[in-house]
Structures are given as C-alpha cells and as structure tokens.
Amino acid sequence: MKRIVAETAVMLSLAVIMSLSPYYSWLFVLMSIYSLLTLSWLFMRKAGRISMGHSFLFGFPVFLASAGYSFSSEVSIQLFIAGCALSFVIFYIFAEMTGRTAFVFLTLVFSIFVWVSSPKLVFEKGGYLTGGEVGFSFPTISQKELHILTGGTLTLFYLIYRIIGESRAGYFMRAVGDDETASKAVGIDLRKIKALSILLSGMTAWSAGIIYGLEFGHISPEIFSVEISVFPFIASLIGAGNPFASVLSSFGLVYLSKILNSMYPGLMGIVYAAILILSPKIGWWVYVKGKRLDEKAG
Amino acid sequence: MLMAENIGVAFNGLQVLRGVTFSVERGTAVLVVGPNGSGKSTLFRAVMGTVKYRGKVSVDGKVIEGMPPHRRFRLGIVLAPEKMRVAENLTVRENIEISGRFRDAVRIFPELEHLKNRKAGVLSGGERQIVVFSRAVLSDPSYLLLDEPFQALSDENVERMISEIERRKRRAGIAIISHDRIEDVVEICDTLYFMLSGRVRRVIEIESAEQAIKKLEKYMIL
Amino acid sequence: MLRVNGLMKRLDSLVLLRDVSFEAKKGEIICLYGPNGSGKSTLLKIISGLERADGGHVFFRDREITNLSPWEIVENGIAHAFQIPRPFRSMSFLENLAVSCMRYMDTDDAFRQAERTAEEFDVDYLLERSSSSLSQGELKILEILRAYLTGAELLLLDEPFASLDVENARFLKEKLLALKEKQVSMLVTSHRMRIMEEVADRFLELKEGKLYAHG
Amino acid sequence: MALNFLVSFFSIALMALLVSTNFRIGKFLNLSLGGLFAAGGYIAYFTPNPVFAALSGLLFGTLLSLAISKICRSVIEATVLSLGAGILIERGLEIVHRSSYYYFVDFDYSTYVILLGAVSYLFVLGIYLSPLGLKMKFVEEDHELAELYGINTGMIFTVTTSLASACAVLAGFLSSGSLAISPTTGFGYLISGIIVSALTAQLRQVGAVHYLALLAISFAAARFMEVLI
C-alpha cells in the first residue's frame, strides 16, 4: 500500500511540475495519453493476452466520434458509445476465437487493416469533402482544464490497476494469464475474466482516446498507425512489465521521440524498429511466460 | 560406436541433464529406463542435436559438435521421437516415404497397406507408433534411437517390432527408452541404463532378463 | 455420488470411448487403469468438462452435469488435477492454493485457508517457494491440493504417480490417504498397480474405449 | 479494364503467395514484405534498375532470416522481429525522402506484375510437384521432424525468405508506375495478401493444392481487395 501511495505521489508531482510551462503542459498531456495506452495494454496482458492492435481499441471510438462531430455533438456522443461497445465486442470475440499466439496475429492484422481502410471514409459536408487522409476535427477545451483532466484520469486508472492487482479479480486475471486450462480446472469462469480484462483495458484506452482528441482538436487515420499499436508493447518491454516503470518509460519514450524527431523526422521510428528487432533478446519475459511447463521438463 | 560424454543440458536455468555418459556399440542394444523427467528423452535429443548441450558426442570416433540434426542423420544416427510424432496433415505413405520405400514398411507391418492414404493425424496411438517406427528403420541407420516405441501398441505389433529390432541389431547399434514391456525388451538388450533426475544412477550389464529385472526393481516400481 | 451413463467420444472417425458406464460412492477411491491411449485421460476430461462428450450422460449428486463448462462443474464439487502439473507460474505455492479458495471466500480468508491446509498436509515448508522452483513431486502435491481446495468432493487425478521416484510416490500416497480420511472421493488413473493397491477401493479397466470392472 | 483487373489480381495473389510461403515454411508472419514493396517503389524512383531491386531484396531477406534464426524461438518473436524490420525500412524511406510526401515515376511497368505473379506460382507449383515437394511438405508440417530426417531446414528457410523478399521488392518496383509512392504504400498489399492467405489456410490443404486454392481465392477476392491497394 505504501508503495502505491509513493508511486501516485510521484505521478502527481510530475503533473504539477509540468503544468508550469505551456509547452511542458502540452507534453505532459501527450505523455499521459501514451501512458494510459500502456496501462490499458497491461490490463489485457495481465490476463495473458498480448494485443498488437491496441490502436484500434484506443482510436476507433474517438475516430467515429470525430466523424460524427461533423454533423452534431449528439451524433458524436452516440457514435462514441457505439464505438466503445463495438471495439469491446470485437476484442472479446477475438479472445474467445483464438489462443494466445493467434490473438497477437489477429489484433495486429486487424489494426493494420483498419489503418489502411480508414482513409476510405470520406463524405460530403456543406459542399466540402471531409475525412480521407486528413481526418475530422474534434472539439477542444482549455489547456488548463485538459491538464487537470489528464492528470486525474491517469492517476485514477493507475490506482485501479494497482488495487485490482491485490483483489480476487486480479488474482484470477493472473491465473488466466499464466494458464487458461488450469484456471478453468480450479473453477475460474474464463469468459468473465476475459471480458473483465478487456473491459478495463477498453475503458482506459477509450479515455485516452478522448484526451487525444481534445489535445489535438483533430483525428486522422494515423491514430490507427502501427507505431501506436506497438507503443504499449515497447513501453512495457522497457518497463520490464512493472506497471510503474512502464508508465515512466512511456513518459520517457514520448519525450525521446520529441527530441529525436525534431533532430530528424522519422528518427524515433528507427528506435522503435530497433527495439522490436531486439525484443526477443531483451524482452524474454514477455514471451517466456506463455510457455507451458512440460516444454522444459523434457 | 556412438558415444556421448559428460552431457549437460539446462532449460531456463533448470538442470535437466547433469554430466551423463552413454554409449552404444554397433551390434548391441541398450535399454534406458527411469521415471518421467529423469532426462531420458533429453539425452536422446542431445545426441541428435535438437537441444543445446554441453559435453561431447562422437560417432565412430568422429566428434560431431555443433552439427545440426540433419547432418547427424546423414552420418547414420536416427531418432524416432516420443509422443508419436507424425506429420499430421500428410498421409501415412508420405510420412514413411521421407526415409525409404513404402513397400518395405508394409513388409514389417502388413496393416500399413490399407492405411496408406489416410492422414496420419487421424490414426490411433498404436497405428501412429508403427508409422514412427517404420520411418526410423527404413532409413537404414547405423545408430537407432527409439523413444518409447511400444506405447499403446498391440501385442502382435510389439512382437513384430522386437523381431525387427533384433534383425537390425546385427549391423546397427540400438538404444531404446521404454516404460512398457520392459520384461520383453530386456531379452534383446545387452546393457541397461537407469536414470534418475538427470544422472545415470546405474549401468547394468544384462546377463539374463531375470537378473536385470531384479536389480532394476530395487530402484523403481515396474 | 457420481454416475456415468453410456459415455461416447469420437475424434474424427476414431472412437475413443464407447458406452462407458460406472458409478462411484462417497469417499470411494477408484483406480482406472489400461494401456496408453485407451481413453483414460479423455474420460477424466469429459467428466470435468475440459472436453465434450459426443453421447451419454454424467450425473453428480443426482444433477446432470454433462458438457457443462469446467467452472460450472467445479461449482458442483468436482475438480481435475492434471498429469503434467500446471501451476500458475507467476505465483508462489501459497498463492496457487489461495486462488483456488477465492472462488468462494474473500482474499484474506483464502490465504488463511490455504496456509491451514498446507499445515494439515505437512507441506507448509513450501508455502513461500515460487512455483517454478518446485520439484516434480512437489508440483504434484500442489496440483492435487489446489484441486482439493476448490471445495471438491470428487477429485479426478490423472496419473498422479507417473513421474515420481519411489520416495516421492510414498510421500504422495500418504497425502492421498489423508484426503481419503476427509471423505473425498477420487477417480485416479494409473498404471502403477502396486502402489494403487494400497490406496484404491476398486479397479476399473479401460481397454480400447470400453470399460471392464475388476475386484 | 480487364488488364487492370488482372494486374490487381496478380498483385494480390503474389503477395498472398509470399505471405503464405513465409508462414508455412518459415513459420512466421513476414510483416516486412509491406516495407519491401514500398522500397521497390523508391528504387524505381532513384535507380530504375530491376536487377538492383531484386538483389537488394535478396540481401535483405537473407539478413532477416539470419537474424530470426539467431535470436528468435517462437512464431510471435519472429513475427515481431519482422514487424520491426518493416518499420525500419519504412522509417528509413521517410528519412530518405524529405521533399514531398508522394513520388511519381514516369514509366509504367505495372503489367509485368502479371508475368512476375504467374512465374512465381509456376515456380512454387513446380517445386511442390517435384521430388523436393515431399521434403517441403515435411518442413511445413514439422520443422524438427524434417530436420531429424535429414532435411536442411535452415537452408530452406533462408532461401524461402530471401526469394520472397526479392519478389516483394520487385513487385513494388514494377507497380511503381501506377502508384503514388510513399513509405506506407505496401501495407495495403500486405494486408490483402494476409487476408487471402488466412482465408485459404482455413481449407487445411497441403502442398500444391494449397497454392492452387490460394490462386483461386485471390481471384475471387480481387474485386473486394482492390479498394485496399
């Protein structure tokens, strides 16, 4: 418990310090969005599912909402809710349909599919074409409000993550993450736990999506890009699976990408690529856990 | 002679084999027994090169360190792996023809003839075993490693297998891991290795089947 | 208590179980033996819901439980222990046991219950060990106690003695007898007849998917 | 119109073939093929030489397969590594071109894609119908078993990955005339290839039959997939 309080205190003080300058406030919001994305990914990872298509969970509702915003705020809200429900259902169906390995492929391929096909969404509005590669606009709020909203959301979901870890649901999620068959055999309702972990993951990602929209005032198909999909994987790889370290490494990665991309656009992509290529060497813990015991018992 | 000296294997930091020495001469057969998890299969796989190991493996005096399994195969070492490993989506015929002529297999096990176009994945355990066994034997190995060949096998086929092993033994060295039918297998073997938690605990020269079984019963429940 | 009636299982064209029927009484230990591939494990998996039956019925305490999902069957009081132990690898011995109890009690009570049970069975020295550091014999104990702690009245044990040496097998045998004193019924597959003769009340032989009763 | 349809049909069929061979023989989903395709377009823009395109693909494929066999132990690891390689190419290309987002080349070889696709299919079918076919089927089914029976799986893996990479670069090179070239050009092709080969995999066929089915399904899917590419 002490540790959770200390970790939260660190995050809150970061939030306060970074609110002092407008640039850093903007950066803090961006870092928090990515940290939320990582947390969201960790919720699913806890129940044993490695998602490589998290950009879909993160981007789909807010993408729909921004398309709806071209018409009215009501349509936007309705579409957002529909997007949340739909993305939850799709991920749940994926998790029911597939084992661990196939889930990685399916989510990855699906998110690339959405990324490639989302620019096809174009419609005419008041004589102008909107959508396509450019995307849609989204309402904004003042930077101060956004800063407080973001800091609050991040702290909230971090606390939820940590508190769930100590609870019955958290133990069940870990058990399912370790071995689905054995979990069934000790009476854990696999469907419920899968649904729970996807729901928690979704709630985190959806909130991050809204904040993303509010921060940029604009959503383009790039919200589904492969880089966003693999970001949480990379961040938790560097954070060695520890939630606090993963949140901090998300902060660090965003900061690094700002520095590198201002030196040379695309440079951060090279860093991501290098980490992915070396991941079997440095991220053994991500992969190794899924393996069954009899493989090593020979 | 096929010789494995001081073989050590570790998976994820867990020692599965700790300095095992093991050898088979041409013209002899050895039986390896021990409880599950004692490292028998891992020993065979180290000899075949499908797991990483420390130590030295040599065949007919030639050291074969760092050689991938397919080159060891070409030197005449053949492993019939455990768990009835067949290529499930290929037919019985295709499964066997990878190493030799199908009709030679039919000569040992006549029932293969009417199974030939069936996919290996739908075979029963016993049928799979004869596919695994004939595939290994047909490549005419100098050293044959059989991992649990008698599992789930009918009595008739056990006899066919044992007489085929006896026939092969004249020219080849044969090593067998078995839980089942130890009384029958001991009859055709010359040496018995008893393994426990990654070590060879006893090497018994078999003089008669009864004597060997008696010694073995001190260590395990048969 | 357990009644199995005309159970059938096919795999493509292959018949794994044909018309298997038997009954088990409370507190009884039944040993199921037979050659490899005769369908022993499949039978256990069907009873515990891990595999589906293609025909026939399973009743437990007069309720039909055929083809329910595994967690519903655990709810009814049947638990399965695997042949190759499947511990939750990120957890300690204690946590593994506690997870089992959490189905019906809150987390703090679950940990206390797990500790108490470990003491009862003289394995409390293992509590803090991580499950990846346990030996084969210790893993078997973990597997069986974890199944017991789901609140089961019938345990399905798949080859509990298969990978144990003489010493560990004796140790495990004592634990099974201790469980028997608590009136837990067991259906055990094994081909180590000598040790089973000291434990089992009754033997059933499964051969090519058919069941034969023996003294 | 008919010609256009044939071009997209063979583009999709070719990508499906590359994805499928890599997955079945190499045991990984090769996600670098999209990046390689885009790289083909860039080569067409800067040094319009098909031999150079093919050779650079071959070199890249060889490096990729060596990296995978050195450090990867599972399908997922290999797939993630290939994704990293794909992003590496894509970002590399982004750094190469800074002036504008799209490039256009002033020649159009895109009809040759039909030839490349047809030749690739004939080549693969030929191998599967030859005595080498049984060995390939064994590699598809079970790497270790194939290795135990004297098949050099490492060599087959390297050759398959290298040839597939060369093919992907070449396909991108030939298609460049009909495309707006950008670093992410290849993803549409890649994703259609993956979808087609995933659909075909549901039929659970092996050997030559599988590749014929792949061609048939590409034909059926070409109309729907055209929008993606």
Image (tube, rainbow, N blue to C red):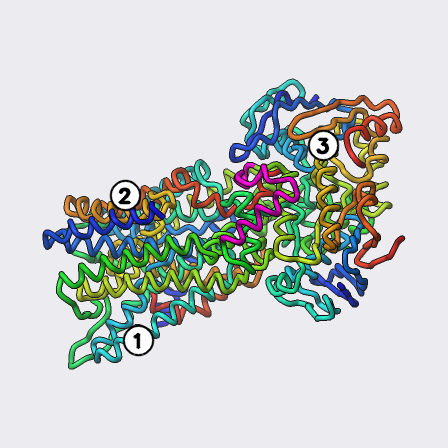
Residues under numbered marks 2 and 1 in contact, where contact means CB atoms less than 8 Å apart: no
> In terms of depth relative to the viewer, which is nearer, C74 or A286?
C74
Does any portion of residue D18 appear in the rendered image? no
* Residue for badge 3: B144
Which residue is more in the foreground, A229 or C213? C213
Q: Chain of mark 1?
A: A
Q: Quadrant of residue A133?
A: bottom left
Residue found farthest to the bottom: A126
- Residue C11's label in the rendered image is none
Count the marks: 3
Q: Which residues are magenta?
A: C108-133
Q: Image quadrant for the C terminus of chain D? A: bottom left
**Distance between mark 3 and mark 1 Cα atoms:** 67 Å
Q: Secondary structure at mark 1?
A: helix
User: Where residue B151 sits in the image (x, y, percent)?
Assistant: 76, 44
C129 magenta-colored: yes
Q: In the image, which is nearer the foreground, mark 2 or mark 1?
A: 1
* Image x and y of residue C107, in percent: 49, 54
Extreme residue in the top direction:
B61
Residue A200 position by quadrant: bottom left
x 45%, y 45%: residue: A287
Residue A132: % across, % down? 24, 69
Query: Which residue in the protein does label 2 denote?
Result: A271
Dominant SS type (magenta): helix
* Tag 3 and tag 2 share a subunit: no
Q: Which residue is painted at 18% across and 59% down in the image?
A: A147
Numbered disc 2: secondary structure: helix
Measure how far apart labels 2 and 1 are at the Cα level.
Answer: 36 Å
Residue type marked 3: Leu
Relative to residue C80, is residue A239 depicted above or below?
A: above
**D147 and A18: which is toward the camera:** A18
Residue C44, horizontal then vertical, whole percent: 71, 57
